[in-house]
């Protein structure tokens, strides 16, 4: 479950990256202008707060991952959040709730995610930080990548904008930005280039719904349907897992059919107050490094039954 929670946290942080560079290029439409202005406004915010949830369901279980936290962008990027994963197994409807806490830091050398569940010992994942590219080029990429943008509604100072992102534009930008980098792109996560392309396509070609305050130009809410991403990534993991563990065709077919019933949606609310400096407690700083799970490890972790400790406190 720790691996699953970390992947969801990764999705949350990836969504924040939509607002990670000043926009300098000219917009193509009013909707694009709202999006790019929100990116620019968020870039200049020092502190922000957020809360949200991820709803997921399948024919075997329903669940909710809820979370709240805060972030800082200056002098360095840090995020602190806490939440819980509640899973109800069907048809028995036995609910298990697993609390978790996360700190995430980013500096010139490393991106580090600290995490613990059920008040256990802290662990951390560390990966090399890749320096950002020219903000103007990143802004130009975002404008080109925005697809089918339109303003869905206006109510008071709020505007709701629907759009998608072109994965080919983002992929071309990422490859150019990674030229000369010493860090393998995708290989360190255990996915092939073709698999990365499938996963990125599922991530960016979904519908993003962004709510913006027309006065402050700041984003106040975003919603993402992650169902296709989960299904496509799950199919890749299932294929790896079935080959590694020797699943027969009937077992693989049953698992694949189950996977197609999975639905996942995420919604996050953003607010902007003065906030406080995010300081890592000593016990967090002393966290032992955890090995990045391979796709086969991840598939096994997601499909495994909860251990005895996780089932305690079931209601």
Image: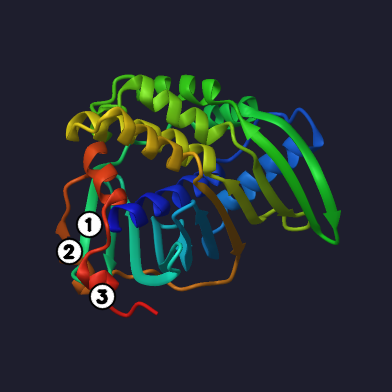
Q: Whole-percent x and y of residue 84? A: 41, 69
Query: How far apart are the alpha carbons under marks 3 and 1?
Result: 14 Å
Residue 105: give its label.
none
SS assignment at label 3 = loop
SS assignment at label 1 = strand
Q: Earlier in the sequence, mark 3 or mark 1?
A: 3
Identify the residue at horizontal 53%, vertical 62% (top origin): 53
Residue receiving disc 1: 124
Quadrant position of the N terminus in the picture? bottom left
- When asked about the image quadrant of residue 179, the answer is top left
Residue 119: give its label.
3
Q: Nearer the viewer, residue 89 or 274?
A: 89
Identify the residue at horizontal 34%, vertical 21% (top origin): 193
Q: Earlier in the sequence, mark 1 or mark 2?
A: 1
Q: Whole-percent x and y of residue 300? A: 24, 46
Q: Whole-percent x and y of residue 33? A: 74, 38
User: In the rendered view, would you say 9 is above or below 298?
Assistant: below
Residue 287: give its label.
2
The crowding category of the residue bearing disc 3, from other C-alpha atoms within 10 Å (few below 14, some 14 to 19, many at least 20), is few
Closer mark to the observer between disc 2 and disc 3: 3
Q: Is residue 123 visible?
A: yes
């Amino acid at each position: 479950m720790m691996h699953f929670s970390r992947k969801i946290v990764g999705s949350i942080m990836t969504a924040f990256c939509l607002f990670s560079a000043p926009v300098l290029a000219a917009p193509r439409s009013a909707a694009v202008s709202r999006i790019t202005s929100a990116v620019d406004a968020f870039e200049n915010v020092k502190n922000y707060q957020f809360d949200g949830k991820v709803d997921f369901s399948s024919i075997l279980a329903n669940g909710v991952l809820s979370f709240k936290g805060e972030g800082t962008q200056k002098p360095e990027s840090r995020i602190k959040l806490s939440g819980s994963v509640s899973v109800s197994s069907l048809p028995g409807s036995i609910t298990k709730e697993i609390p978790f806490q996360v700190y995430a830091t980013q500096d010139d050398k490393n991106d580090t995610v600290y995490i613990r569940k059920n008040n256990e010992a802290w662990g951390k994942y560390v990966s090399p930080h890749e320096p950002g590219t020219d903000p103007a080029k990143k802004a130009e990429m975002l404008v080109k990548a925005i697809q089918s943008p339109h303003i869905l509604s206006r109510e008071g100072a709020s505007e709701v904008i629907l759009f998608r992102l072109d994965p080919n534009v983002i992929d071309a930008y990422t490859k150019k930005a990674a030229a000369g980098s010493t860090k393998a792109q995708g290989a360190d996560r255990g996915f092939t280039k073709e698999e990365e392309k499938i996963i990125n396509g599922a991530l960016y070609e979904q519908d993003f719904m962004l709510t913006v305050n027309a006065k402050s130009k700041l984003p106040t809410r975003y919603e993402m349907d992650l169902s296709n991403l989960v299904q496509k990534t799950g199919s890749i993991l299932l294929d790896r897992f079935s080959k590694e563990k020797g699943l027969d065709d009937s077992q693989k077919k049953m698992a694949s059919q189950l996977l197609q019933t999975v639905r996942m949606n995420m919604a996050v609310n953003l607010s902007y107050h003065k906030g406080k400096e995010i300081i890592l407690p000593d016990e967090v700083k002393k966290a032992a490094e955890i090995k990045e799970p391979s796709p086969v490890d991840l598939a096994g972790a997601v499909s495994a039954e909860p251990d005895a400790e996780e089932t305690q406190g079931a209601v």
